[in-house]
Image (tube, rainbow, N blue to C red):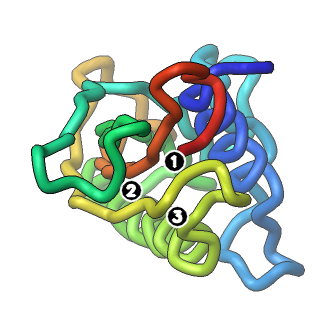
Amino acid sequence: MAPIITNIETAMKTAIDAMTVVGGYNYNWNSPHQPDLALASFPCCVILIESERCVDDQNGSDERVYTNEVDFLLIVTGQLSSTTDIPNYSINAEHNKALDDLKKVFGTNYHITNTCDKIMYLGMEREIKKNGDIYVPGEMATRWKVYYRQDRLTPETTG
């Protein structure tokens, strides 16, 4: 049995991979979690964990489970289809559509295929790349908080 966090990451990747224009999204997302841009299709997204912590308290729901929250960082890279005079500005529209896609997929599937209690959107930040690439001039980092419970005696089991 895989660890719960692994199941959550896999479910996030699967949900992102399933987003298509035909399915009502802005893009066909074909390469989630591909860090090599030469192998990726755009937009692409790398899924990272920033931190994980237990948020139990003495008055919690059940002493037999841990109540956890994980902060995920999803780094989205978009691509311009043609050159523009201001690529650092033009990429914003692509990233905004990608952000809408992510909000939609996790807004309609906030349990991520029953791997967690809920996923919440926290915010985003844009970063301009300094490499001068006019087609891929920047990235967008989105932050998500995931809540889940796990059994204290068998941590692979959802609590």
Amino acid bearing label 2: Ile
Front-most of residues 5 and 16: 5
Task: Please report whichever mark, 2 or 1, sits nearer to the chain's N-terminal start.
Answer: 1
**What's the mark number on residue 130?**
none
In the picture, measured across the screen, residue 33 lies left or right of residue 71, that is: right
Q: Are marks 2 and 3 in contact (CB under 8 Å)?
A: no
* Left or right relative to 96: residue 79: right
The quadrant in which the N terminus is found is top right
Mark 3, residue position = 102
Instruction: Determine the residue positioned at 72% across, 59% down.
Output: 113
x, y percent for residue 144: 34, 51
How far across and how far down the image is residue 42, in percent? 66, 45
SS for tag 1?
A: loop
Mark found first going from the N terminus, 3 or 1:
1
Mark 3 residue element: helix
The residue at 23%/60% (across/down) is 122
Task: Name the foreground residue: 138 vs 53.
Answer: 53
Q: Are marks 2 and 1 in contact (CB under 8 Å)?
A: yes
Q: Which residue is mark 1?
A: 78
Marks 2 and 3, Cα distance to the nearest angstrom? Answer: 17 Å
* Amino acid at dot 1: Gly
Can residue 72 be seen from the camera position used here? Answer: no
Q: Give whichever of 12, 6 is nearer the camera.
A: 6
- Give me the disc on residue 91: 2
Question: Can you see residue 95?
Answer: yes
Pair 2/3: label in front: 3
Query: Mark 2 or 3 closer to N-term?
Result: 2
Q: CA distance from mark 2 to mark 1?
A: 7 Å
Q: Nearer the viewer, residue 28 or 33?
A: 33
Give the structural element (helix, strand or loop) at label 2: helix
